[in-house]
Image (cartoon, rainbow, N blue to C red):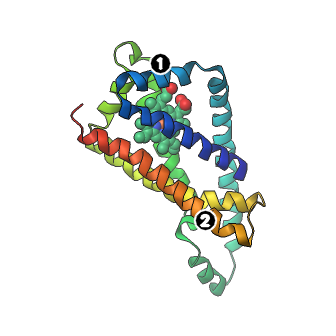
Amino acid sequence: MATTGIFLMIFLLLHLSVNLFLFLGEKPFNNAVFFMRNNFFIRIMEYVLFTGFLIHMVFGIKLHLQNKKKMEGVNYVINSCHKTTLFSSRTMIYTGILILCFLILHLMNFMIPMKYYHQHLNSDYNIVISLFKNPFYTLIYIFSFFILGIHLSHGFQSSFQSLGLSNKNRLIWIQRFGYFYFWIICFGFSIIAIWFFFSNN
Ligand code: HEM
């Protein structure tokens, strides 16, 4: 889970960097998407990404069920301790499910129309910015980035712990990087949606 989680976090940084080309205008963004779509290495990585995502989901569900089983029959005192654990760590399965729902919507909004139909009618840039003219989609997207941030804020720290890369001294730095990463992802993606919602393009 930790390895696939780190891989997905790297994907998000790359995805955000490509999306930031939207601020440079139509041609730079379309060129960036064209480059990503036609690059052999990136094409291979798409399959790796899909497999990584599946593995991450399957193991996540398995871990959740194992933890649930462990908690069954455990007395009230331990259960009340459990309540004091971080909100983000207790809700990983729910935030994960919401991210999956967002991803299905997102692929239907962008990847499928861009790759399989409209492309000759509309540029990639126009498909993206016209979506953010819709307040309903803009709100769903911003809400999903926030949920993604909650999921990542726990995922970042626990990945390092699971891989045995964390210790007492490093923990504080891992936590700081975790929050920094959370803000980059949450703010970076949201600013795109908000900017194009208010812009006159
Ligand atoms: C402002 C926010 C976002 C914008 C504007 C955006 C834009 C896009 C676009 C234009 C594509 C299609 C690329 C292509 O067909 O080649 C795409 C694909 C994709 N996006 Fe996003 N995205 C955003 C946020 C996210 C987030 C937060 C996630 C993850 C939770 C995500 C995951 C994906 C995945 C998995 C693909 C398909 C993989 C690929 O084609 O490379 N996106 N996105």
The residue positioned farthest toward the left in the image shown: 200
Q: Amino acid at mark 1?
A: Tyr
The residue positioned farthest toward the bottom in the image shown: 77
Labelled disc at residue 80: none
Q: Nearer the viewer, residue 7 or 13?
A: 13
Asked if ligand 1 lies within 8 A of label 2, the reply is no
In this rendering, would 76 be left or right of 111?
Answer: right
Give me the residue at 69% from left, 80% from top. Answer: 74
Give me the residue at 38% from left, 21% from top. Answer: 27
Give me the residue at 30% from left, 31% from top. Answer: 130
Question: Which class describes the residues within 10 Å of circle 1: few (<14), some (14-19), or many (20+)?
Answer: few
Figure quadrant of the C terminus: top left
Secondary structure of residue under mark 2: helix
The reply to whether residue 69 is visible in this rendering is no
Question: Which class describes the residues within 10 Å of circle 2: few (<14), some (14-19), or many (20+)?
Answer: some
In this rendering, would 1 be left or right of 102?
Answer: right
Residue identified by numbered label 1: 116
Q: Nearer the viewer, residue 114 or 7?
A: 7
